[in-house]
Image: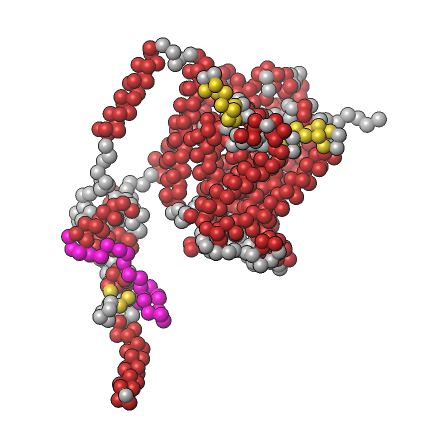
Amino acid sequence: MIALVTAAQVAFWALAPLMVLCAIGMVVSRKPVHSAVFLAGMMVMLAVQYAALDAPFLFVVQIIVYTGAIMMLFLFVMMLVGVDSSDSVVETIKGHRLASVLAVLGFAGLLLFGIGNAIKGPAAGLEQANAAGGGNVPSVAELIFVRYVFVFEATSALLITAAVGAMVLAHGEQVFPKIGQKLTAARKMRAYAETGQHIGPRPNSGVFARHNAIHVPALLPDGSVAESSLSQTLSSRGAYIDAGELRAPTDAAFAEISKVTDNAGELE
Amino acid sequence: MNILENQIFGADPWWIVLIKVVMIFVLLLVWTIFNVWYERRVVAKMQHRLGPIMNGPFGLGQALADGAKLILKEDFRPTKTDRWIFNLAPLLTGTAAFTAWAVIPFGGEVRMFGHTTRLQLTDLPVAVLFVLAIASIGIYGIVLAGWASNSTYSLLGSIRSTAQMISYEVAMGLALVAVFMFSSSMSTSQIVEAQALPIRLGDFNTGIPGWYALLLFPSFIIYAISMVGETNRAPFDLPECESELVSGYLTEYSGFRYAMYFLAEYINMATVSAVATTLFLGGYRAPWPFNQIAFLDSGWFGVLWFVIKVQLLITVFVWLRGTLPRFRYDQFMHLGWKWLIPISLVWIVAISLLRAGQNEGWFRGPVFFVVLGVIIVGLLAFILFGGRKDDEPEGVSEVTEGDFDAFAGGYPVPPMPGQQLPELVSVVPSTLAYPDDNPADERAATTNGADS
């Protein structure tokens, strides 16, 4: 006869080894992004364990909040480090390793006692807890919004304070006013009214077919350089191509053409 | 132990579950191929072109050929990319795209091979949140693709995409809250059934089903905007805008791995449309005149209504793409964080006040009308006399006197308005964008990046 196994047990024995592997992978990976991916994988599997243990709300919240938001922010920052970089193992803070070992021992002790208590003590079972509020979601809601409402609100106040603090630290004073599209348009209209300056966009650099580089000025119909087609940085350095040099091939071609047309005129 | 809290779904034999899984898989693949063709044809119509017409009936073979080409192409990985992550990323996105459909109801109860079952793979008491959770796993594929490609364009594209999807997921989640409150459920099939109740005006039964798109119109609009943002589609397709980022996060991808992203994008478009259909447009239940005929509103007809509604929403996606230019990134974020999220929050508070008030009977008696009057007068006063501030922004206008001191106050500081870095004196003239209006100053503003 086959012993009766529940879905939760199957899920546990299928996922627990993978989770341990992911956790080890997270610690031993050299690249921070690999660590983050291992951790995210472990979190997703933890979420599946919750689902197998009859806690669907915890299952989705674990994925949305931890995997989707918090881990993503971590990853976001670490991505900027680049693919080729890997962790340095030089001890930068004095006594760092010793403190880490102590912290790990302390945490292990906490885990041991916590899990030990849970195993030794009688378990009420999740079904009973779910039945209290008439379903998993209402039961969780009742705990959060009725029984522990002050703790919950206090935690959220703490988080908001942290977020506001981060924004204050990151906030830069605006030295120049922000010039939006509306203001730009208004200024252009005023400039047009006062000085007759062209309202539309400034000309592109390089209108010749053979040049469109940024250091090639646009030419006006009379052959002079359109100053506003050049970056001011380049024009004040004098780092742009001379208009005469630009015009030379065209002039030569034009001279050839006019010679031909002159001859044609004689023939007629 | 039954995690589904729903006997109907727990009771399916395994082979029915398998049939449903295969059906969803095949349907999504075929639908994607159809949608690729559909989008190209509809956009072509909007732009007075023909689109693909050469291969197969109506050009339908074109999408199939394109898909086959992608799969048969050489699948190479650029050097100096991260091998594991580069391979993992498209799989994550592709898998997540399929997984979300597990909780989408295609129809109501039907008879299938002698079993009564629902046309839905499974249902959870938190099914809608499940879709959001799976979407957030799908983002991993995009983020990791950008990083693993070891390319600036890819990284920038993936950063944009992630920021965009995370931001718009907030607005999307908030838009869904009102639906949860009205249907008092987060299970997709129950939300659909809750919408089938007809709207009543007083004692008169209109017969029009109470779709949340009608009852919760602001939520629907917010969801509709954020679903376009969530799928990275035009006009919010900033992560892959050709003019700036080549192809964004999938610049370095080709062949089958590219096909995974392509597939995922089209499935995601269908997914968000399906969620919109389920939550706001009555799901698999028939629209108005047809819901009066019981035969058309039951059994396998549900699939028809569902597919029609989703296809119409996909048409809207195509229409947007054919009509609107791309947003600028800061405008897009501005829209999400400063408009959609605050509006959703206010709307949720208003809705919950309304619901609580109806339950508690606040809207009877004189106090309610006094409060209402005060609010209306306040709003009128704001509209009439509130006014807007002057359009010219008030910046820090005083120009600091004296030469630039890089260590003013003992800390390294940037130059203040009117000051200048000594090494730039010969390069850029010190006319900064400020605040007088002559054109030379505006030129300087542009080169300094102060022009937004």
Residue found 46% across the figure and 46% down from its top:
B319
**A212 drawn magenta:** yes
Left/right of residue B74 with respect to residue A196 in the rendered view? right
Residue A231 position (above or below residue B449):
below
Q: Please, which residue is most extreme toward the right here?
A: A1
Residue found 24% across the figure and 54% down from its top:
A199
Left/right of residue B35 with respect to residue B241 in the rendered view? right
Left/right of residue A11 with respect to residue A235 in the rendered view? right
User: Is A113 or B123 nearer to us in this picture?
Assistant: B123
Magenta part, dominant SS:
loop
**B174 drawn magenta:** no
Q: Please, which residue is most extreme toward the top here?
A: B365
Residue found 46% across the figure and 32% down from its top:
B220
Residue B95 position (above or below residue B70):
above
For the magenta stretch, what is the residue range? A194-216
Instruction: Tell me how the rendering is colored.
Output: secondary structure
User: Is A64 or A98 nearer to us in this picture?
Assistant: A64
Q: Quadrant of the N terminus of chain B?
A: top right
User: Is A111 or A47 nearer to us in this picture?
Assistant: A47
Residue A159 in the image, given as x and y percentages of width and height: 43, 29
Q: Please, which residue is most extreme toward the bottom here?
A: A267
Whether residue A91 is visible, yes or no, is no
Whether residue A196 is visible, yes or no, is yes
Residue B228 in the image, given as x and y percentages of width and height: 47, 41
Residue A236 in the image, given as x and y percentages of width and height: 24, 63
The total number of labels drawn is 0
Where residue A268 sits, quadrant-wise, is bottom left
Residue B298 in the image, given as x and y percentages of width and height: 63, 29
User: Is B409 or A155 nearer to us in this picture?
Assistant: A155
Residue found 23% across the figure and 32% down from its top:
B387
